[in-house]
Image (cartoon, grey):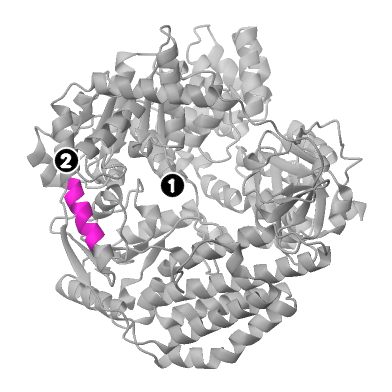
Amino acid sequence: MYEQEKENLRRLSDYIAKILRPSLIKTFMTTYFDKEMVERILSAEETSVTAAAQMLLERMCSLEQEGWFQAFLDTLFASEYTGLHKAIKKWDFSELEELNEYRKLLESIEPSITKLIKPSELLTHMNDCLKPRECEEIKAVESQRGHIAASEKLVDTLLRSDKPNWFKVLKIALDACSFDQALELLESNGGATASMGCASDGEADSMMTEPMATVSFQYREEAMSEDMLMSANNMTVTETPSGFTGERKLRQYQKELTDAAEGQNTIVCAPTGCGKTIVAVAICEHHLKKLPGRAKIVFLATKVDVYEQQYKLFKEHFYITDPNIKVTGMCGDMEMSVRLLIESHDIVVLTAQILVNALHSGEVPSLDLLSLILLDECHNTTGKHPYNNIMNRYLDTKLSSSTHSLPQIVGLTASVGIGSFKDRTEAENNILQLCANLDTRVIATVTKHLDDLRSYVHTPEKDFFEVPQRTSDPFIRIIKNIMSNIEQMAMKVFNIESLSNIQNREYGSQKYEQWIVSVQKSCRVIAMKNSDEERRICRDLCNYTEHLRKYNDALIINEDARTKDSLDFLDAFFEQVRNAGFDETERKLTALYDSQRPQLLSLATEGQQNPKLEQLKFILDEEYHNNDQTRTVLFVRTRALADAMKKWIDDTDSLKFLMPGVLIGKGRKSNFTGAVMTATSKKGVLDSFKSSDQSKILIATSVADEGIDIPQCNLVLMYEYVGNVVKMVQVRGRGRAEGSRCFLISSCKDRIMKEKINMMKEKIVEEAIVELQRTDLSHKVDMLQREDKAQRDLISASPKKPKKQGSYRLLCGKCKKFACLSDDLRVVEESHHIALDRSMFERFTTVPHKKPITFCDFTKNKKMLCGDCKHDWGLIASYRIIQDLPLLKIESFVVQDCVTEEQFYFRKWREVTFAIQRFDMKEITAQTWPPRDTAL
């Protein structure tokens, strides 16, 4: 009964769940569901409205009572879900689809617009698109938690609205209330909506217009990347009169890998670009058929970028082939219950740390909850990596209990050449350890269908370009002379040579950077009888070493890029110093730079060119002269160098047509604009690189090594870029087109030799795999697992060093200004540390945070800086209904024992040796801890 309606509800469930809020149709649920199910759905709504709506729809599809579907429609209409009622009644979602653009726009500007509006003023103008209950809830949030929290509630409500006029009503309300900045923000971003949005939105909405039409997809063989494999451009589309059907034809080598993992723990080892994620999808399909209704699958990714890519692929695939398979994803700070997601879905795509956290907190009590775990880039399952944390729990359960039902494990990787090794025996031992960590005795590689694999995956031809360094460089001499002068200035303040054991440091080297870090760590805990003198020395040494660090960075940039780029880097740093307001020491250091800058500018403008850049230009000119359709990925070591290389290409007449795109990681700090990339900007760069009339070269750091699906290219350039065997295999694998080539450009003979050794090691790994595939690995793997567990048990049994009791002072790590006492510290949710000391507001200043975000129950909105030296102390954040709580970074402070006066430095809170009380919400209220501005 109602089979067609149920089929359509299943097909459209993802779309409906983004709008429907179960508690607003509670009367329908209590009529047709049992009490326990209603309570489960309402409880789930507190964590995730979308997940709760999915549960509701899933339960509806099992209803058999007469009239339930009409009752559902009637309840929607009575609950003022007029847009959704119309769409479901006619099975035409075209009007609601037109709202997607506005949703994406509002979602993208949410962090900014919520700071610019007051919902209590807007609500009187928004009755046409908000339900009375929604208005009351927003008002309640504003009275209890403030207007920012209420603004977030309003935005969330609008994002779930089914009223076709909500965007227009919002603009009218903003105009009526004179919220001009918010209105300008909304209108100025309107033109960009087509490119906005997240890969995790499950974007298949355009297919949801006809109730009876179905789509059949068949993959064509010529697709090269996993993204292209799943794209609509590589599918055959037909309409059939009933039921969704999907057909996917695996390549022969992909089927070989899939079959090898049937029902057993397996490492799937295959080249980059061969479609390992397609193999993972096929393994999931087999597993779901083997355990119908009981399968619970988790696909783990190492990074958010990779998660978004893989989640989109899984979502689109199963939407096409079997809409009944429920796929969802979770990454970062999404506020959802992991257990609920697992219980209400068939496949969950996660970043690994989320599962680690859920296991640690007990939210997911055991891995027995799952039937299959797939680990992307599984060679990372070593040491303290989240993958290894998960597998240690798995192995502890397996080796400690005979009554368990553990999931199947499947790892995916391009290379198992982990660790250091000199010969095949050592390589085999490393691979065996990886097998033990993943509890597998099977390493699946393509052996039967190698010709098929080689017809799709092409190994680039490798070549090396050894380039001489600059013969002489006055710019380098001047910078080194400045650094020598700064060291002498520092020596007059304190004997810095006594603060570090690192010897034979050279300017412009990684070793010099290590020396600076070592000196800074030691100078933080210098103790003197005269506290004022101690503060002055500590602050001066911090300034001297920070300037030395920047000059060292400038030398490193100059080695690989233009002198101009090195000077731009220094100019940006000193601009920051001037804007921050500097003390006497910084004035001297700035004057020293200013005195040399004219000569540095002259050298940057007219000095000798970098031979490595000349060689790179020659290669690119030749390649694009011979083939103007060449696609290049240029790998560099640092974000600063990626920025410099882009500027160089843009400034070079013969190369500017390449229109370079830059793909870099988030990093922590940078003096370069655009140094932090969002998921949306990364997607834009990759999309541009795919287009033949846009970017022809992609400049990438290590973020592109692993997992991210870069479109096929035929030239891979490694610019002083060398790593281990796994990195070499992954980087080289970016050259997927037939006839592709891979060049290493370097002025360092040792670096070139290291890459040649990597090539030899790759062959050793291949031989080791063949040998291990011939062998029964059970005995060796079992032995390694028992040894590892014994070691873990020994560590667990060792008594933990108790936290010290007593009072400690937190002093600014740069100037030793008193910040607060340890007695005033509280730990919130096991990982966040706040200070409950109102007087601390007098000792710091704040600046607005560029990207206010919410994580857990915190909303960070300002940066907290030392009132004297402007050293970064942490954040000012709201927690639930409490405003303006100081959220401290322990690495920014020195800890001093109040009794002994001894000083300590800790990089992370988990290293702290003294006890910190847990936070209790009863300690403070919104009244006893008012917002800072109110208190002042």
| Rendered-image quadrant of the N terminus | top left
How far apart are the two marked residues, 1 and 2, measured between alpha carbons?
29 Å
| Disc 1: CA contacts within 10 A as few (<14), some (14-19) or many (>=20) | many
In this rendering, position of residue 202 left or right of residue 18: left
Of 753 and 167, nearer the camera is 753
- Residue 709 x, y percent position in the rendering: 33, 48
In front: label 1 or label 2 = 2
Q: How many marks?
A: 2
Classify the position of the C terminus by image quarter: bottom right
Question: Which residue corresponds to the image point at 46% horizontal and 74% vertical from the top-left?
Answer: 507
660 falls in the magenta region: no
Q: Nearer the viewer, residue 778 or 186?
A: 778
Q: Quadrant of residue 557?
A: bottom left
Q: Position of residue 871 (x, y in %)?
A: 71, 62
Residue under circle 1?
305
* Residue at 44% over, 83% down: 476
Reading the image, the residue beneath label 2 is: 766
